[in-house]
Structure formats: structure tokens, C-alpha cells
Image (cartoon, grey):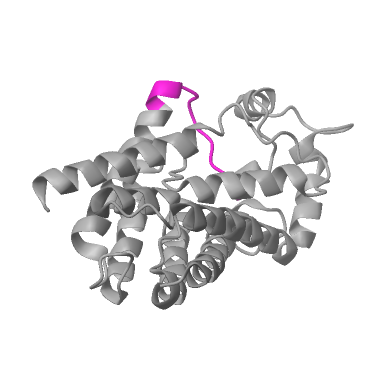
Amino acid sequence: MSSSDIFIGETIGTAILILLGGGVCAAVTLKASKARNAGWLAIAFGWGFAVLTGAYIAGPISGAHLNPAVTLALAIKDGGWANVPTYFAAQILGAMIGATLVWLAYYGQFQAHLTDKEIVGGPGAQTTSAKAVEAQEKGAGPVLGVFSTGPEIRHTVQNLATEIIGTFVLLLAILTQGLNDAGNGLGALGGLITALVVVSIGLSLGGPTGYAINPARDLGPRIVHALLPLPNKGGSDWSYAWVPVAGPLIGGAIAAGVYNVAFA
């Protein structure tokens, strides 16, 4: 496949992934959304279906990596590094486009949520919860969770380990079960397997950090959160932002190493 095919496929596929994945977070989180408070099951399955949709769209064009950790693991597995920068750039761009589309789709809900005194504070607001106060002190605004992940307990070693473990499971499943015949991306059955693994990771390992397991999924939308003209949006929690980037890359690299030793 050509560099242009890779760039187009990964941009579109990752944009769809983030549009649907970020969309379910917005649906569950934002005031005046019909799905508000639908819960963790909705989020876990929403992200799984988002992966499935993005993978089926991008698979025939780019192999549907949609995740720098996948690209890195495949490069380690096969030694093919030439297209890695193209994949990375397209994935970050696609994630930013997808996050922007979530904002457009939920524009009214964002406005209602971020101007509600019960949520953002102000005269007449009730006392905010200890968790909300702690989050604000750490620089995480009230809708950052729609865009990016954040830990329930801020412990760097644990948070990093959680992302490494979750991504290791994802990549080991992809490398052993999900690749197409060429071995350079997800096949049709591989997309379904990967989507189900993402749901499983969300349900089993998503509680501590929100399971980024994808550097582009976290970094691209976090950049968009920082740039969008959202009222009372608060901080983008850049002090934490390296964890959901480094953790998945480390987890992907370890999975590729284990695959080459145990399965290749």
C-alpha cells in the first residue's frame, strides 16, 4: 500500500473511531443528553463498536492500525519502519478530527453542561464533591473525560502499569488472532476479535485509568480540548498526558517482543 493510502485510511478510520468512542463518552456524561448516566457498560461497548467500525472502514486501505501502539508492535514484529511516521501522523490527525466532530455533534450539550452552576460552580452552586475538587486542582476540566482519559487514583506507577498491561493484552490478541493475510493490519475477522477484546479490556481493566490503550486516542482529543472555545472548560491535565502515551507504546513493544519469542 502507498503512503497516501496509509495516510488517508488511517486519518478516516481513526476519526471514525474517536467520533463514535468520544461520542459515547459525551452521551453518557453531558447534561441534556438522552443517554446521560447510562454507565460503564455503555462506554465499554460503545468503544468496542467504535473500533469495529473504524477498522472495517480503514482495513482495505491502510490495514486499520488506528493506534500508534499497533503500528509500533507491527514494526517490531516485522522490522518494517518506513511507514511508521505516516501512520503516527495520520492517527493523531484523525483523532483530532474525530474529537472536533464530537464537539460539533454535542455542541448544545457542551454549552448546557459547562454553563450549569451545579457543574462548574458559581453563585448559588452547591458544594462540589471532593473528587471534583481534586480533579480541578489537578487541572482536569469537567468535560475532559469526553476527550481524554484520567485516573481515578493518581498514582503514576500504577497508572502507567495499568496502561501497559491493557495494551499488552490488546496487542497480543491482535498479533495472534487479528492480522490480515499480509500481516500488516487487521483483517475482517481480526476487526471483530479486536473490538471484543477492547470491550473486555474496558470492562476488566478500564476502571483505574479509563483505558486509553492508544496514544492517538488520548493525545489528539486532549489537544482539541485545549484548543476548543469551550466555556469554563478547565485544564487539559497535561501533567498526566504522558502516561496514556508512554504506557500503550511500552505495552505494545512488550507484546511484540513476547510474540516474536513465543509465537513467531
Q: Is residue 139 above or below residue 25?
A: above
Q: Work out which quarter of the rendered image holds the N terminus and state it.
A: bottom left
- The number of numbered discs placed on residues in the rendered structure image is 0
| Residue depicted at 49% across the width and 52% down the height | 85
Q: Is residue 209 visible?
A: no
Magenta stretch: includes residue 154: yes
Q: Position of residue 21 (x, y in %)?
A: 53, 59
Q: Is residue 253 left or right of residue 153?
A: left
Picture quadrant of residue 61: bottom left
Magenta stretch: includes residue 242: no
Q: Is residue 184 above or below residue 40?
A: below
| Residue depicted at 53% across the width and 57% down the height | 91
Q: Position of residue 43 (x, y in %)?
A: 48, 55
Q: Is residue 55 left or right of residue 181?
A: right
Picture quadrant of residue 83: bottom left
Q: How would you classify the magenta stretch by its main secondary structure? A: loop
- Of residues 235 and 71, the one nearer the viewer is 71
Q: Is residue 153 left or right of residue 168?
A: right
Q: Position of residue 263 (x, y in %)?
A: 11, 52
| Residue depicted at 32% across the width and 39% down the height | 251
What residue span does the magenta drawing correspond to?
147-158
